[in-house]
């Protein structure tokens, strides 16, 4: 059962190099550029975006999901030049069990710079401090070694394998389960 959280306004977070903020219609092209890349979307479980209209619908879904308390998705912005790097956020809320799942992606041209790890550390800290979350899970395709490294560097631990958990492109895939808990 999907449960919701409530915040009075969208939380803006800052790290040493990043600004994490709500995703606006002005971000649609940058989001399309990122999510239309086959390599970025390879492990997402859905095909790469094919049109700017799909990116616009996704931006609207992010905004509506926050307003309804279903999910929260931040745009990851490089502070020094305002470049949109990707998104990160939480979904699959379970208020009874004080848990949610995390998701993220970074534009391929920015891979390897530590931006995903920096953003994840910031939103995890926020969740543990302000959202009454005890446990955050992450699901990762077994071939996505880079994402596994990001999670491990952000303080997550590998928990196990979910057999046949994801169906994509007419095939079932196992997913590795990671988690971190509030200390």
Image (spheres, rainbow, N blue to C red):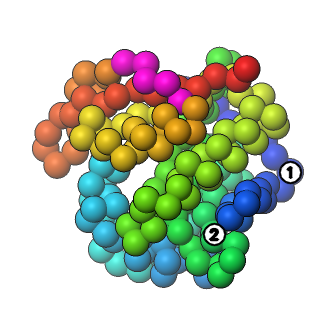
Residue 124 falls in which quadrant of the image? top right
Does the stretch in magenta take in 70? no
Are the residues flagged by discs 2 and 1 in contact, CB closer than 8 Å? Answer: no
Residue that numbered label 1 is attached to: 8
Looking at the image, residue 12 sits to the left or right of residue 26; the answer is right
The correct choice, above or below, for 90 with respect to 182 in the image is: below
Along the line of sight, the residue nearer the viewer: 118 or 43? 118
Give the magenta part as a residue range: 156-160
Name the residue at 69% across, 47% down: 122
Along the line of sight, the residue nearer the viewer: 146 or 8? 146
How far across and how far down the image is residue 9, in percent? Answer: 83, 56
Residue 92 falls in which quadrant of the image? top right
Residue 58 visible in the snapshot: no
Residue at the right extreme? 8
Q: Which is closer to the viewer, label 2 or label 1? A: 2
Residue 32 falls in which quadrant of the image? bottom left
Residue that numbered label 2 is attached to: 77
Looking at the image, residue 15 sits to the left or right of residue 147; the answer is right
The correct choice, above or below, for 176 with respect to 143 in the image is: above
How far across and how far down the image is residue 2, in percent? Answer: 57, 32
Q: How many marks?
A: 2
Name the residue at 68% across, 52% down: 66
Dot 2 or dot 1, earlier in sequence? 1
> Circle 1: is it few (<14), some (14-19), or many (20+) Cα within 10 Å?
few
Along the line of sight, the residue nearer the viewer: 111 or 126? 111
Q: Could you tell me which secondary element the residue under label 1 belongs to? A: loop
Residue 139 visible in the snapshot: yes
> Circle 2: is it few (<14), some (14-19), or many (20+) Cα within 10 Å?
many
Label drawn at residue 68: none
């Amino acid at each position: 059962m999907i449960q919701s959280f409530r915040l009075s306004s969208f939380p803006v977070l800052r790290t040493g190099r990043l600004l994490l903020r709500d995703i606006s219609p002005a971000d649609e092209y940058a989001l399309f550029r990122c999510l239309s890349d086959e390599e970025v979307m390879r492990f997402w479980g859905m095909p790469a975006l094919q049109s700017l209209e799909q990116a616009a619908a996704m931006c609207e879904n992010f905004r509506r999901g926050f307003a309804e308390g279903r999910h929260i998705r931040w745009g990851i912005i490089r502070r020094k030049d305002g470049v949109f790097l990707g998104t990160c956020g939480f979904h699959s809320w379970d208020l009874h069990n004080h848990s949610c799942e995390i998701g993220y992606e970074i534009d391929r041209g920015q891979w390897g710079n530590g931006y995903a790890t920096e953003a994840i550390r910031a939103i995890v800290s926020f969740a543990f401090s302000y959202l009454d979350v005890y446990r955050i899970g992450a699901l990762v395709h077994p071939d996505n070694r880079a994402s596994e490294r990001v999670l491990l560097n952000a303080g997550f631990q590998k928990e196990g394998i979910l057999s046949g958990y994801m169906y994509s492109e007419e095939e079932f895939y196992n997913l590795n389960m990671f988690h971190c808990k509030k200390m």
